[in-house]
Image (cartoon, rainbow, N blue to C red):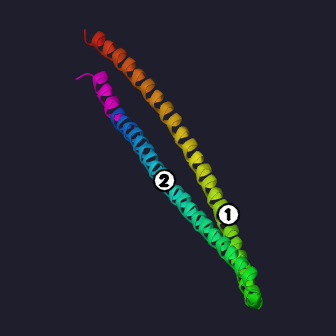
Amino acid sequence: MSTISKVLVVLVLLLVPIWIILIATVAQYNRNGSEAMEQLKKEVVQVEKDSAEAVASVQAMRDQIGLEQMRTGQDLATIRSKKAAIESMRTEALEIESRLKILQETSEASEKLVQTDREQRIAELKAEQAAMAAQEEEVEKLKEEHAKLSDRLAQLREEFKTTYESNKAKVARLVK
């Protein structure tokens, strides 16, 4: 075996681990990108579930408030009719009326609480959407980096092929 053949064999043996490392690196980047994308999809599904639950609970609270207001209105009408019909029970009617006012204030306080909770849920949703957008940007960056590395790998393959072919031709010329 000639010296050039030996040199070429050594060069090929030295380049094989480099190629293996490059291929393993590209595969790792692909795997990491896929895992990150799956995680983001799971988070999106969870946020959508949480959002739907929040909307349902707010609607249920609104319904309860509406029923409570209807009951309060009915009670107030009943109290007024009793007050007009029975003058002797005036003091008792005033006491019931004051209780109804307290109930209405409690109802209004509950409504404000519900509104505050809703605003908080909206803020949380916006924060989650911003976080999701940031994650999507990072995924895009990883995709771009992957594309650059893939292009570089293709370029290195072409250089290797060219070098290999030229070395092969030189060896063939030297052997003749």
Up/down of 49 relative to 92, above or below: above
**Residue that extends furthest to the left in the rendered view of this protein:** 1
Residue 138 percent across, percent down from the top left: 56, 44
Residue 7 percent across, percent down from the top left: 33, 27
Which class describes the residues within 10 Å of circle 2: few (<14), some (14-19), or many (20+)? some
Up/down of 150 relative to 93, above or below: above
- Left or right of 22 on screen, residue 5: left
Q: Disc 2, disc 1: CB below 8 Å?
A: no
| Viewer-side residue, 97 vs 14 | 97
Residue at horizontal 76%, vertical 86%? 94
What is the three-letter code of the residue carrying label 1? Gln
Residue 109 percent across, percent down from the top left: 71, 73
Q: Which quadrant of the figure has residue 121?
A: bottom right
Residue at horizontal 76%, vertical 91%? 88
Q: Earlier in the sequence, mark 2 or mark 1?
A: 2
| Viewer-side residue, 2 vs 61 | 61
Magenta segment range?
1-14
Quarter of the picture containing the N terminus is top left
What is the three-letter code of the residue carrying label 2? Glu
Q: Which residue is mark 2?
A: 43
Residue 158: say if magenta. Answer: no
Q: Which residue is mark 1?
A: 115
| Viewer-side residue, 58 vs 66 | 66
